Amino acid sequence: MNTFQDDLVRAVDYHGHLCAGQIIGVRMARLGLKLLGITDASAERDLIVYVEADRCIADAVGVITGCKLGRRRLKWKDYGKSAATFLHLGIDKAVRVAAGKKFFPGEGVDLIEYFHAIPDEEFFTTAWVKVNIKPEDLPGKPSVKEECRKCGEAVMDNRHVVNSDGVILCKHCAGFGYYTVIS
């Protein structure tokens, strides 16, 4: 396993700057891997990680675990929490790690020294959990591919909607879009 410093350098290089989220995310990922008995995340193909915020922590957790959104091994749940769940498919175990208490370094305090000095037991809460992962959420090729009957775009992995008339639609065409077409 890399040192904390080595992991922090990798995370900061990817993220672009040093911040508390990077330090916390590196520590969170290292703890999750340790609890699952993973010593070399780069060689691990049975790990899926769910991050609960789209903030700095997510970048650090992804870098340290080697899990990527595009490889379907990094999942984002929009809970707005500094937490991540580490699921090892090979042994069917999962652990959720959350930054439990609020710690605020004073002005001018070295962030790395400050956050690194807090013991894991004080800084994080952990819980062994069961993750109900659907087959269409597993890494690999799309399990199902449908075509939206309105816009014609492909919809992968059971993310389509079947309306009351039995017509297959993408979420946008079914009225659940996050954007509005203006041209």
Image (cartoon, rainbow, N blue to C red):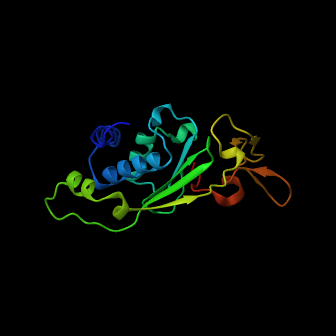
Residue at the top extreme, as displayed:
43
Instruction: Give left or right: position of 177 versus 53.
Output: right
Residue at the right extreme, as displayed:
165
For image coordinates 29% across by 37% down, the residue present is 6
Residue 123 rendering spot, x and y as whole percentages: 35, 62
Residue 39 rendering spot, x and y as whole percentages: 44, 38
Depicted 42 relative to depicted 103: above or below:
above
Q: Is residue 27 visible?
A: yes
Q: Quadrant of the N terminus?
A: top left
Residue 10 rendering spot, x and y as whole percentages: 33, 37
Q: Is residue 52 visible?
A: no
Residue at the bottom extreme, as displayed:
101
Residue at the left extreme, as displayed:
108
For image coordinates 49% across by 43% down, the residue present is 37
Q: How many marks?
A: 0
Depicted 41 relative to depicted 121: above or below:
above
For image coordinates 86% across by 58% down, the residue present is 165
Which residue is more in the foreground, 104 or 80? 104
Indicate the quadrant where residue 11 lies. top left
Instruction: Give left or right: position of 7 versus 90.
Output: left
Indicate the quadrant where residue 24 lies. bottom left
Which residue is more in the foreground, 77 or 126? 126
Instruction: Give left or right: position of 167 versus 62.
Output: right
Which residue is more in the foreground, 132 or 170? 132
Residue 180 rendering spot, x and y as whole percentages: 58, 55
